[in-house]
Image (cartoon, coloured by chain):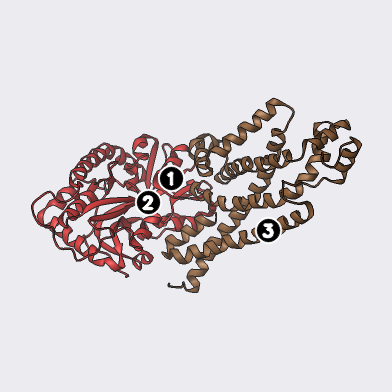
Chain colours: A red, B brown
Amino acid sequence: MQGTIARRHRRLAAGITALALALALVGCSAGTPAPTNSEPAAEMDFDVAQDGFLTIATYGSNPPVNIDNPDGTLGGIEGDLLNSFAEKYGLQVKLQPTTFASMILEVQQGRADMGLFVYWTEERAQTLYYSSALLKVPAVVFTEKGFDYEGPDSLAGEKIGVIVGQVWAELMQKELGEDALLFQSQPQAAQALLNGQIKGYVTGLTQMFNAPLSEHQDEIDAHELVDGDWNMPESVLQNTGYNVVSCENSALATALDEHLQEMIDSGTWEETFSALPDEFTVDETVPPTQGC
Amino acid sequence: MIWPDWDTLASWLELMLAGLVVTLKLSFLTTVLTIILGSLSALGAVSTSRTVRIISRVYVDLFRSVPILALMIIFYFGFGPWLSEWGIDTFTLALAALSLSSGAYLSEVYRGAIQSVPRSQWRAAESLGLGHFAILRFAVIPQVIPPLVPLTLNAVISIVKNSSLASLITVNELTLSGTMAVSLSFMPMQVYLLLGAMYAAIILPLIFAAGRLERWVNRRYGLVSARLKPTMAMRTYASAAGLGRRDR
């Protein structure tokens, strides 16, 4: 199965790059400041950290979910959703780049209005309010091309990278101890893999399409994690991503969900979603169990 | 502010005490290497050989001009592919970056202390037929070591604090383990207060010791590295060379 995934990724690579570019262009056009139509902005019943802006904490591009364009605009399916949402309320999308671990704190402490594409955990749900489900992404371990991967045992004694704060970090640290290297950002971990400083990198499949791995797809393989790998529970093998807001600002998530529903009803969302590769699915566009 | 329950606190402590051990190990080894590098470089800076002086100058200027974090990133991501082939791990890279940088700073402190010994004392020792190394060993170094002890302790304090930068190249030291604890519990203020307390527990005794040592040195030898009191050996050299008190 793992070999099959690796082969499928090669076929997908060209397609998803084109899709990411198209979504980025949509994001660029939709991410321009302020509403351009003559319709009055909808009345906001939620708070924003900075007047006139929808401040979004992001831990870097995560194609095809979110693409942080160099000009500060947001692309990807998140760009489709949030640019039109901001426009509806007369806001301008403002990206606030940070690390994954800090992103959650930025939202929790109200310095950013929203965090992008966060998986659900019981602990996170106690401090963050989740919007509706966006996409389900399989967890994978990346290895260098040609590495004879036959499950976690084939990486025994090797250094494996994980990102601080991601759902796999604690589990891998408990399982591997010092062999689990904690990176602060995705590009750092990916670069270490390409450098040969780590033999494996556990994260979501989306990173296959993010730099620097996207530029070196012929040098790496992605192996989907299966139940029991490194004693991981099934709940972290297929992860649904949500946007998150602070518990005190749940009205923002509710407004976003309403906007998403409008996009679903108008067929816009299906159009965006149908262009995604088969690996990315969603069970139901609903929020998870809230813990706030 | 919400206080964590005991289970949460225990999980933080488990993570952070492991990080604390790494911080102490990294700081200790860095201190040893820093003192060695600083001493060798300072001796190189006052060497009679122009080549050695140039090598020492280049080392000091180069490593003082690059921030430690940048140095770590250069070592880890820049030279990473080659260094990992040689089996050099991230801890060693952090140790090298911290030691090279701190050693360059300490070298300047040591060089300043050595050069603060009046030239007349060097000449007095030379007049007895002592060579460069013998002068350093018997006349200069015994004088400068006591005032350098508190200054070196201050360098150790900087080393402990700078060791937190190693977290950015995956060394699982105290700061990184604190960040990990925050990412699991989402109680940043509480975790970071604990983190600050742990650093303070290491550094405050060092500050106290440095202060006490500095006062002791001031009482015993005068102002640190400014009014170095000649040793008995130096008085002997000076009187043998016929130098007056003012020349000393």
Whether residue A289 can be seen here: no
Q: Secondary structure at mark 1?
A: helix
Which chain is indicated by disc 3?
A: B
- Find residue A98 and name its label: 2
- Mark 1, other Cα within 10 Å: few <14 / some 14–19 / many ≥20: many
First in residue order: circle 1 vs circle 2: 2
Camera-nearest label, 1 or 2: 2
Task: In the displayed orientation, state which residue is furthest to the right.
Answer: B240
Q: Say which residue label 3 marks.
A: B211
The answer to whether marks 1 and 2 mark residues whose Cβ atoms lie closer than 8 Å is no
Calculate the distance from the C-alpha at mark 1 to the C-alpha at mark 3: 43 Å
Nearest the eye: B224 or B245? B245
Q: Residue at image x 87%, y 37%?
A: B243
Calculate the distance from the C-alpha at mark 2 to the C-alpha at mark 3: 40 Å
Q: Amino acid at mark 2?
A: Thr
Total numbered labels placed on residues in the image: 3
Instruction: Describe residue A92's horizontal placement relative to residue A103 as left or right.
Output: left
Q: Secondary structure at mark 3?
A: helix
Check if mark 1 and mark 3 are on a common chain: no
Instruction: Describe residue B135's horizontal placement relative to residue A148 as left or right.
Output: right
Which chain is indicated by disc 1?
A: A
- Find residue B217 and name its label: none
Q: Quarter-wise, where is residue B198 in the image?
A: bottom right
Q: Quadrant of the C terminus of chain B?
A: top right
Whether residue A44 can be seen here: yes
Q: Residue at image x 60%, y 63%?
A: B201
Which chain is indicated by disc 2?
A: A
Q: Say which residue label 1 marks.
A: A189
